[in-house]
Image (cartoon, grey):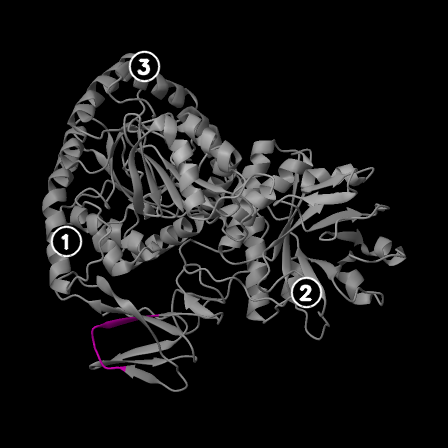
């Protein structure tokens, strides 16, 4: 039997597992089912703590023991080819019409129509706009048999007009529609959470026997589609969504990335039992952290089971505009950085042809990435073959531990540093772009929820009173000449700091890079120091991640500000690149602040907005209302873009409140599982409101629904008037 070990020694003797590790680790136990294939395990719901001051034995030969750390160096199998050198993760080729995916094929771009599938011409014309924009697969919803049948007319009209892009039928709840569509289009997408299950939000404790009976029921329901796909050469995506996990999966695995993986594997095993392998997998969530962990765990599980299916990447219900782009880049970009992903769909609450340029910008960044400067390799484990010693878990978020220096590090939210060093003249009006508004009549500063924490002014002098919550950072030589050093701090190079005898007694910002980190800081007094970690590497995120690993390996707990430089790229590319570079580190718990230096990319206001947007998307610092808004499709029962704009206009001042705006019941209570309040289309002109997952009021007239949503927010105490 397989035993997964993380940071401890585990040996299987007759009738028992003996564990040797450090005190305070947390173990998860899983039992091996005799009726299921070897290496298939059922996770027990309980979690136990085992203090290991001495070897500990569990007397049960059918236990799988997985050890998770608390900031100790552990042995991990990794989910990509390398944590330091960029290369594509190799998957099998899946044929989808004339556009194959996986293997050495390019990362494919795709989107989904928003028209009524029964409107053939509208769907065809929108599909053409998508294809002309660069869309390689066109997904179309088929909520019932009649829509599935009309896919044939849509396909014929597209082919007649000279467009041969593969079509994908999107299926929820309706196996009969899937079975018909699979005979017509090149690919079908099924959601394992609702293909054979109705979601009732019931918590059921299944015995192993009852659970296996449920799997047999799914097998009976799903097998006909598998056989049809195999016969017709139709590809399939098994697409798990975090918000629509079945009650069965939730009861056994919880609302977790592991549950998402197991949801897909249940269906995948059925496919393989019928020797059907033309499959793509996806693990989508509106929370980028959950999404990234789920994909990583899926790859780990596939490696264990000798699988290599292509991966479709996406952050579901990312939203619109800046928020949707930042959230998508934080999730999708984090995986692309490690060479993960064979196709990308960016889900925006906008017309689908506008999704493709965003997806293309994310993907194109990696076309020449392999030519990077070398980064020191991560240490391989001596005790556990094919694993790496890491001081953090890529599969379970924990923020890196750091000391507190002023308001930076430890439990403080990540800080935002604005860069004004390139300005010719700094005056009170300059601060407006970064969240500070000086009122002349009252002689006071007004702060927004996205007011930066520090401003780097370089060699500039600031000769006016600054807001009481703001700190100024100067080049060290300039700072040393200041007469008034209140809320003013120096920025040293590493060598300057080592040599300087004149240092701040509060905060010393010290620039470092990977070379400084690898040399170490032994014997240095790092009290009152905050590192500013820089990189000039093309594969900069990986280099900075490697620096964090080294710091943690040597117990260097100095707070770290992550700094990145961008020059002469478009504003959209800047936003996507920054969201990827910072987002990938923040999602792994790295970074006590972010510092963006740019030239010729964006205005100071948009740079500041991007910085706070990345922190919001990674859930590391909340500064505004969050909208979990689906991208619309043919199932949508109201004008999603218009309604989202109306709700945003009324509620965008409610810091920390999450509002789900869903076009139909498919993207309803399950899909918005992460939201505080929900606005869901349930019929033509009808809206149902939710508080969390609970229905509060059904079938409200759409023209009254936004007011009803505001009343609901007020009722639960989350409302405040604008300007308060």
Which disc number belongs to residue 162?
Answer: 3
Whether the magenta-drawn stretch holds residue 60 is answered as yes
Mark 3 burial class by Cα count in 10 Å: few <14, some 14-19, many 20+? few
* Extent of the magenta region: 58-66
Quarter of the figure with residue 590? bottom right
Residue linked to disc 1:
215
| Mark sitting earlier along the chain (3/2) | 3
Q: CA distance from mark 3 to mark 1?
A: 43 Å
Mark 1 burial class by Cα count in 10 Å: few <14, some 14-19, many 20+? some
Q: Nearer the viewer, residue 29 or 116?
A: 116
Which disc number belongs to residue 405?
Answer: 2
Q: Is residue 625 left or right of residue 256?
A: right
Which disc number belongs to residue 4?
Answer: none
Q: Secondary structure at mark 3?
A: loop
Q: Is residue 553 above or below residue 685?
A: below
| Mark sitting earlier along the chain (1/2) | 1
């Amino acid at each position: 039997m397989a035993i997964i070990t993380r940071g401890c020694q585990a040996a299987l003797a007759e009738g028992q597992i003996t564990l040797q590790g450090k005190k305070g680790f947390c173990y998860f136990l899983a039992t091996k089912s005799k009726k299921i294939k070897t290496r298939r395990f059922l996770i027990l719901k309980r979690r136990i703590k085992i203090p290991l001051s001495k070897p500990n034995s569990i007397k049960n030969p059918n236990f799988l023991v997985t050890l998770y750390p608390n900031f100790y160096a552990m042995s991990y199998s990794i989910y990509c080819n390398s944590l330091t050198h960029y290369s594509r993760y190799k998957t099998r080729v899946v044929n989808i019409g004339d556009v194959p995916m996986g293997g050495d094929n390019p990362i494919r771009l795709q989107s989904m129509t928003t028209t009524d599938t029964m409107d053939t011409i509208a769907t065809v014309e929108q599909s053409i706009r998508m294809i002309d924009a660069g869309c390689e697969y066109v997904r179309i919803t088929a909520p019932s048999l009649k829509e599935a049948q009309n896919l044939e007319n849509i396909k014929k009209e597209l082919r007649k007009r000279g467009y041969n892009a593969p079509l994908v039928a999107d299926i929820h709840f309706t196996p009969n529609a899937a079975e018909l569509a699979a005979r017509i289009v090149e690919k079908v997408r099924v959601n394992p959470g609702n293909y054979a299950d109705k979601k009732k939000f019931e918590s059921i404790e299944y015995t192993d026997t009852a659970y296996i009976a449920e799997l047999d029921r799914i097998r009976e329901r799903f097998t006909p589609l598998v056989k049809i796909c195999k016969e017709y050469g139709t590809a399939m995506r098994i697409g798990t969504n975090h918000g629509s996990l079945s009650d069965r999966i939730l009861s056994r695995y919880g609302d977790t990335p592991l549950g998402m993986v197991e949801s897909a594997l249940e269906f995948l095993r059925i496919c393989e039992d019928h020797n059907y392998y033309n499959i793509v997998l996806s693990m989508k969530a509106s929370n980028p952290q959950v999404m990234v962990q789920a994909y990583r765990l899926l790859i780990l599980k596939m490696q264990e089971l000798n699988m290599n299916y292509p991966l479709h990447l996406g952050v579901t219900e990312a939203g619109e505009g800046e928020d949707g782009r930042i959230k998508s880049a934080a999730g999708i970009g984090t995986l692309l950085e490690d060479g993960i992903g064979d196709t990308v769909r960016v889900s925006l609450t906008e017309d689908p042809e506008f999704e493709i340029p965003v997806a293309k910008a994310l993907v194109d960044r990696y076309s020449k990435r392999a030519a990077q400067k070398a980064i020191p390799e991560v240490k391989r484990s001596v005790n556990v073959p094919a694993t790496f010693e890491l001081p953090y878990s890529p599969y379970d978020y924990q923020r890196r531990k750091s000391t507190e220096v002023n308001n930076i590090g430890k439990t403080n939210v990540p800080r935002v540093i604005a860069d004004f060093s390139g300005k010719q003249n700094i005056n009170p009006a300059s601060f407006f772009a970064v969240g500070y508004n000086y009122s002349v009549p009252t002689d006071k500063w007004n702060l927004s929820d996205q007011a930066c924490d520090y401003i780097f002014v370089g060699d500039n002098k600031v000769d006016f009173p600054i807001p009481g919550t703001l700190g100024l950072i100067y080049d060290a030589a300039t700072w040393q000449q200041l007469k008034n050093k209140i809320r003013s701090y120096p920025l040293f190079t590493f060598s300057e700091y080592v040599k300087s005898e004149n240092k701040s007694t509060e905060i010393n910002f010290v620039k470092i890079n990977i070379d400084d980190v690898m040399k170490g800081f032994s014997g240095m007094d790092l009290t009152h120091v905050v590192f500013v970690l820089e990189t000039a590497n093309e594969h900069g995120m990986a280099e900075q991640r490697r620096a964090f690993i080294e710091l943690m390996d040597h117990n260097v707990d100095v707070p770290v500000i992550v700094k990145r430089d961008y020059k002469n790229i478009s504003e959209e590319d800047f936003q996507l690149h920054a969201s990827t570079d910072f987002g990938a580190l923040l999602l792994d718990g790295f970074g006590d602040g972010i510092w963006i230096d740019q030239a010729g990319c964006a205005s100071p206001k948009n740079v500041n907005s991007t910085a706070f947007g990345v922190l919001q998307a990674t859930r590391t610092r909340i500064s505004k209302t969050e909208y979990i808004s689906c991208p619309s499709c043919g199932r949508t029962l109201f004008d999603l873009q218009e309604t989202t704009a109306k709700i945003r206009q009324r509620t965008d001042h409610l810091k920390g409140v999450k509002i789900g705006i869903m076009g139909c019941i498919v993207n309803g209570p399950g899909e918005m599982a992460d939201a505080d309040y929900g606005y869901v289309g349930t019929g033509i002109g009808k809206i149902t409101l939710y508080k969390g997952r609970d229905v509060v009021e059904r079938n409200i007239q759409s023209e009254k629904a936004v007011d009803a949503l505001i009343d609901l927010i007020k009722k639960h105490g989350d409302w405040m008037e604008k300007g308060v």
